[in-house]
Amino acid sequence: MRRGVFWQLLLFTLIAGVISVGMALYPAWLPATASEQADRIGHVFWFTTIICAGIFAVVAAVLVYSLLKFRAPRGDNFETDGKPIHGHTGLEIAWTAVPFALVTAIAIFSAIVLGKNDKVGDNPLRIDVTAQQFAWSFKYPQHQNLAATVLRLPVDRTVRFHFAALDVLHSFWVPEFSQKQDTVPGIDTYLTVTPNKTGKFPIVCTELCGLGHAVMRSTVIVMGQRAWQQWVSRAGQATSGGGASAGKAVFTEQGCASCHTFKPAGATGTVGPDLDKLPEFAQAAGQPLEQFVRESIVDPDAHVEKGFPPNVMPKTYKTLPDEQLDALVGFLTEGAS
Amino acid sequence: MTHTAPAHEAHHAPASPPPRGLRRLTAAGWIRAAWMSVLFWALGAGLVCLLRWIAGWHPIWDWEVLAIVAFMVTLPIGFLAGIGAFDYWVYYALGYPTRPEDHSGHGARSWRDYLRVNTDHKVIGVQYLCTVFFFFVIGGLLAMLVRAELAQPGLQVTDAQGYNGLFTVHATLMIFLFVIPAFAGLANYVVPLMLGAPDMAFPRLNALSFWLLPIGGLMFVTAFFVPGGGPSSGWTCYAPLCEHNTFGNAFFNMGVQWAGASSIMTALNFLVTIITMRAPGMTFWRMPLLVWANFTTSLLVVLATPFIAASQFFVMFDRMMGMDFFNIYEGGYVLGYQHIFWFYSHPAVYIMMLPGFGIISEVISVMARKPIFGYRLMALSLLAILVLGFSVWAHHMFVSGMAPYLRVPMMITTLLIAVPTGIKIFSWLATLWEGRIHFTTPMLWALGFVSMFVIGGLSGVYLGAVPIDIHTSDTYFIVAHIHYVLFGGAFFTIMAGVYYWFPKMTGRMYDERLGRLHFWTTFVAFNATFFPMHLIGTQGMPRRVSDYAPEFADWNLFISISSFVLGASILIFFYNIIHSWRYGPLAPGNPWNALTLEWQVSSPPPVFNFDEIPQVVGNPYEYGVPGARHALLNGARQHELEEVPR
């Protein structure tokens, strides 16, 4: 290759490299990380980005250079041909071997990070996550089976999630944690996260799970260790006891709010019917309110309101303990009338 | 180098006179197709009702079972029988006289010949292309509706069910009714010509495989109007959601069977044609790379497609017959679906890419006036992709909950595919080097493809690395990646192919200025639409949602506006193609001065392609080599034959 060509190509590569590095640096590609795993995933991301930006720069430079330098002369109607180069063994070996080495490096780095990210440690906080259409619920088996629909985690402690899905596939993702795991009916799945920043982050379902997929959201709040301890002990006391407060707790715990609107609980979901209108629905069905509410919970397709498809509400609520079911029915009946 | 229709053709034309009177009802064609469709529907419906009555199942008239058996199985068979797809075989099987040398179904004398069962590979190629662009328009309009819904957070255009249906049918049509069959159509036209063959190995099977295709397509489209809503589980149709979902999903299950059967038959046909019908002297190492690409693609299709057929049957059996493949309460295994599905659908990614690689090799070599750089390594890298392509399916399942030990091996094979793919990219670049590049419309699409496919390939490297995939899986990053490889990749190559062979297929030249305008508007709007999706994906927007967090609103509005420009740009293409097909200037036999065989005959080629089978004497891309020839045709060969003592 002539020397001038080499320097020109190098210049083109540098320009393309600067542009791609700029593209990589200017927008915030990854959300502000909030877990150790996310930090490590970020490292793989940037390692890969450097390699890819380099390859892109070389390809772009050669392409643009060729397009500028090797245009056919005007008026040439496919009569003249280019230089008959059939190949170059050295080059062909090079562009087989170099990408091979680069992807191997990415693979090794990824495997190391994967191993570290799956490490659970000695004293993980276990959290049982139940996913169903279209709600998340969380239990803390090491803390009297405390149940919640908003996930609260202590900072700087490794959390081991155990996932169960009641109906279809769902997927648990907190963008700031980077870690993601599908929940699969019939199979136990796990995920390890070590939050390292306090704050409030969204929990997003990323596996298409039906009509309410877009609204199957919850929140994770990462708290200071002491604040979290206080919350655990206070929340532990609230679940017991009867009356409206217990009913409201069941309502929140079971994730009713993600699909239904219900003022007394501050719920604003729109996937299912508006529960503030329960008395009207009961009247239309010609049933006493309480009976109607109970039946609609244990057998959701017994009465399907106009404008809503059947087979959307989970049929799993019939397994609620009687005590909780009574509390829930009481809360709904009182709150709506 | 233009030839008139050879004498051979005259022996077989014209076809027998059009039937009169009652014969019109029984002769193969649309009238017979109409009444046989009704008859076979009634047979299917009667059989269902009879069996349910005998078994004492109520209601006897169960419309879901009827829809599957009568509408989606027996009616299409009746239609195919009526239109004449089985006539020869039925005559043969029943012992009626057949005419093995009957070429009445060959060639097209008017546009009506495109609407009947035709056994000419060139007619079938055009039938394929017209059909796929019809479904492309529907799929494209669905995409416009998707983007209209996503222009703002919240629900404006449709509801959740409607939205899920939109993206499901959009993807299904684009994959099964556009990209895969568009390549089948182009290859149908070009491969026999490139091989120096008069037709495909099995012309009647070829006709049948075309007619299966619109049946699958119509099922996907009609699924929208099914009471309760269309298919809404995504094109991946994951169990168990698709089993519980609206009945429209059954249309997806069955549509895939018809489209899949079409692709398997075509692939078998290509394999036999390429192996047995190469002209004398056309060794494997002298085949154009497009033929190599279709050879490897056909192997992929034949080996992989039965897996998606199985996965969809499992889902349908679960739904209709109460079987328990994916029912966990009876020992079903949910992840089994994904393993079987992706064992097809990952190779399908290469089914949608390798023929495009072939097209690009043809276009770049001809338009840069250079031999393909590293021809043998180019062919070998296709084979490497074929082999590796079967060992990477579980990279779609890194977060699925499959056995964790599978992740690292699948990551390694996935990343290794970057090596043969890289070889192809670098070799195309080297082919441009010191060439004489003509910026014609097909070349613009080819160069656009190379640049866009590099981006799609590199985002694929990100996704191959398990930790990054865990973060980006099921986000808009995936949507961006798939559109860079299937739109910037496959679609751009289809466009390159359509423009490149348009003069050959229609005998007319397209409008070069409109072609360039089409390319540049598409290229800019495409990047404006899909590049920002990488960003909102890594930042946290999941895919397949009708509603999203307000922080993504600005980018989504920008993406939606760009996508409408992208949608509008295709109008330039349709105007150019339709107008040029009717009024364009006549095309010479070889407008690009190319060496491969399809350009050595008239445009369009005679019914049986070559007056006599050409003699291949050299490689297909010897541009710039003094005195090099790919093949000797007619005159030249005649001359040689005369010198041979008899």
Image (spheres, rainbow, N blue to C red):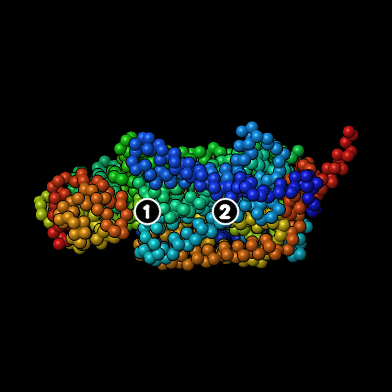
Q: Position of residue A171 (x, y in %)?
A: 35, 49
Which numbered tag is attached to residue A235?
none
Q: CA distance from mark 2 to mark 1?
A: 28 Å
Q: Amino acid at mark 1?
A: Gly
| Relative depth, front residue between A119 and B425 | B425
Q: Residue at 45% across / 67% down in the picture?
A: B558
Q: Residue at 30% across / 52% down in the picture?
A: A310
Q: Amino acid at mark 2?
A: Val
Q: Please rate how many residues cluster around mark 1, counting C-alpha atoms within 10 Å: few if below 14, some from 14 to 19, many from 20.
A: some
Say what secondary structure mark 1 lies in. Answer: loop
Return the residue at label 1. B228
- Tell me the quadrant of the picture where the C terminus of chain B can be found: top right
Q: Chain of mark 2?
A: B
Q: Residue at 64% across / 64% down in the picture?
A: B576
| Relative depth, front residue between B255 and B22 | B22
Q: Chain of mark 1?
A: B
Residue A201 found in image quarter: bottom left
Q: Position of residue B632 (x, y in %)?
A: 80, 44
Residue A332 found in image quarter: bottom left
Choose mark 2 or mark 1, whichever is in front: 1
Return the residue at label 2. B132
Q: Is residue B101 visible?
A: yes
| Relative depth, front residue between A181 and B38 | B38
Q: Residue at 50% across / 65% down in the picture?
A: B564
Image check: B437 left or right of B425? right
Depicted B383 relative to depicted A241: above or below:
above
The number of discs equals 2
Image check: B45 left or right of A252? right
Q: Are marks 2 and 1 on the same chain?
A: yes
Tell me which numbered mark, 2 or 1, is placed earlier along the sequence.
2
